[in-house]
Image (spheres, helix red, strand yellow):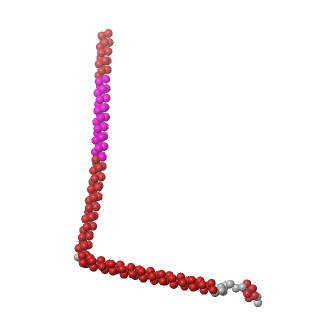
Amino acid sequence: MSQDLTQWIAEVRTLQRQLADTRRERDQAHNSAANWRRLYENEARQRRQEAEQYQAQIADLIQRLEEQKLAQAEAQTLAEGLEQAGSMSSLQGQLTALVQRCQQLNQSLHSERQAHDHTRQTLIAALGDTFDMIKLEPSPAVRPTSALSTAALP
């Protein structure tokens, strides 16, 4: 029986070693999986950041392209306007006409302001004269009280 017991103890020790080895392998597998998971997450994070940067660059390029298209359209409109305006002499003639029109409008504005000032002064003087006349004339509503009482009697 002691041999059976020794054999059982040896077998238990062998199984304990195998169990310890299996646990070690399991821990190594868990560590390896955790390491791979960490590496995968880092790689995924970097790819997301790169994707966001590329999207920002694409949006910036699209905006620049649209601005360039607008600038080209404005340049085209300006070129067409210059072609329609004709030569420099016609532009100078138009500028001269516009300057004359501006001077006429300024002169009209100045005349209108003077007329307004004159009208205002005339109306203020007339109003002042009216007040002076009202002050000088006795009011018909104001009568002596004795005249009222005697007029009321028959």
Q: Is residue 37 magenta?
A: yes
Q: Residue at x 51, y 84 (%)?
A: 122
Q: Which residues are magenta?
A: 20-49
Please state, as top left, top right, bottom left or bottom right, where the N terminus lies in the image: top left
Front in this rendered view, residue 77 or 33: 77
For residue 64, which quarter of the picture?
bottom left
Please state, as top left, top right, bottom left or bottom right, where the C terminus lies in the image: bottom right
For residue 42, which quarter of the picture?
top left
| Image label count | 0
Q: Residue at x 30, y 43 (%)?
A: 45
Vertically, is 58 above or below 84?
A: above
Which SS does the magenta portion mostly show? helix
Residue 93: percent from left, percent from top: 27, 79
Residue 115: percent from left, percent from top: 45, 83
Vertically, is 2 above or below 78?
A: above
Residue 47 visible in the snapshot = yes
Front in this rendered view, residue 63 or 144: 144
Q: Is residue 65 magenta?
A: no
From the viewer's perspective, tell me whether residue 107 is left or right of residue 48.
right
For residue 79, which quarter of the picture?
bottom left
Residue 152 visible in the snapshot = no
Q: Residue at x 48, y 83 (%)?
A: 118
Residue 145: percent from left, percent from top: 73, 84
Residue 12: percent from left, percent from top: 31, 18
Vertically, is 58 above or below 16?
A: below
* Residue at the extreme bottom: 154
Q: Residue at x 24, y 68 (%)?
A: 76
* Residue at the extreme right: 154
Front in this rendered view, residue 69 or 107: 107
